[in-house]
Image (cartoon, rainbow, N blue to C red):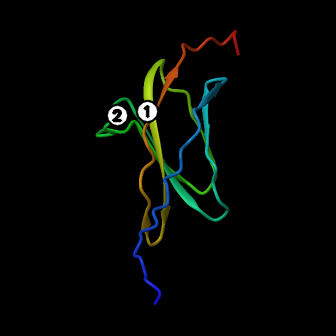
Amino acid sequence: MEQKIPFELKVQPLLPELPTFDRGRMVTRWAGEAGAKYELQVASETDFAAPLLSQETSKSYLILPRPDAGRYYLRLRETSDSGQGEWSAARPFNVPEFCPLCE
């Protein structure tokens, strides 16, 4: 007799790459899939109670204005017409001082 064992399959949230900075822009990427939609948030606190940015896209990257120098956090989730996925873990990142002559 075959015994059935119940299980739950959980899909791990996407994890965005750390941003790069170029000429006053911030670029962040992730391993996206064709046809998927995503929401990215940037905050100055890990609880994201007051995100500085919340943007949806169907691309697997975002090009955003460079934030002021400091420490920030970003997170990402997949969205669809039927609902929203789990947020990724918050990724801390530092924005260096902008130096127009350095870039």
Q: Residue at x 57, y 33 (%)?
A: 18
Q: Position of residue 64 (x, y in %)?
A: 57, 36
- Asked if residue 36 is positioned above or below residue 28 in the image, the reply reads below
Q: Position of residue 60 (x, y in %)?
A: 63, 50
Pointer 1 residue: 73
Q: In the drawing, what numbered circle is on residue 46?
A: 2
Q: Work out whether residue 16 or residue 101 is closer to the camera in this orientation and state it.
A: 16
Name of the residue lying farthest toward the front = 1
The crowding category of the residue bearing disc 2, from other C-alpha atoms within 10 Å (few below 14, some 14 to 19, many at least 20), is some
Secondary structure at badge 2 equals loop
- Asked if residue 59 is positioned above or below residue 25 in the image, the reply reads below
Q: Is residue 44 left or right of residue 88?
A: left
Q: Residue at x 46, y 90 (%)?
A: 1
The crowding category of the residue bearing disc 1, from other C-alpha atoms within 10 Å (few below 14, some 14 to 19, many at least 20), is many
- Asked if residue 93 is positioned above or below residue 78 in the image, the reply reads above
- Asked if residue 4 is positioned above or below residue 34 in the image, the reply reads below
Q: Is residue 48 left or right of residue 65?
A: left
Q: Is residue 20 left or right of residue 70?
A: right
**Amino acid under disc 2:** Thr
Q: In the drawing, what numbered circle is on residue 8?
A: none
Q: Is residue 99 left or right of residue 1?
A: right
Marks 2 and 1 in Cβ contact (< 8 Å): yes
Secondary structure at badge 1 equals strand
Q: Residue at x 64, y 50 (%)?
A: 31
Q: Quadrant of residue 22?
A: top right
Q: Quadrant of residue 50?
A: top left
Q: Earlier in the sequence, mark 2 or mark 1?
A: 2
Q: Position of residue 7 (x, y in %)?
A: 42, 71
**Amino acid under disc 1:** Tyr
Q: Position of residue 101 (x, y in %)?
A: 69, 9
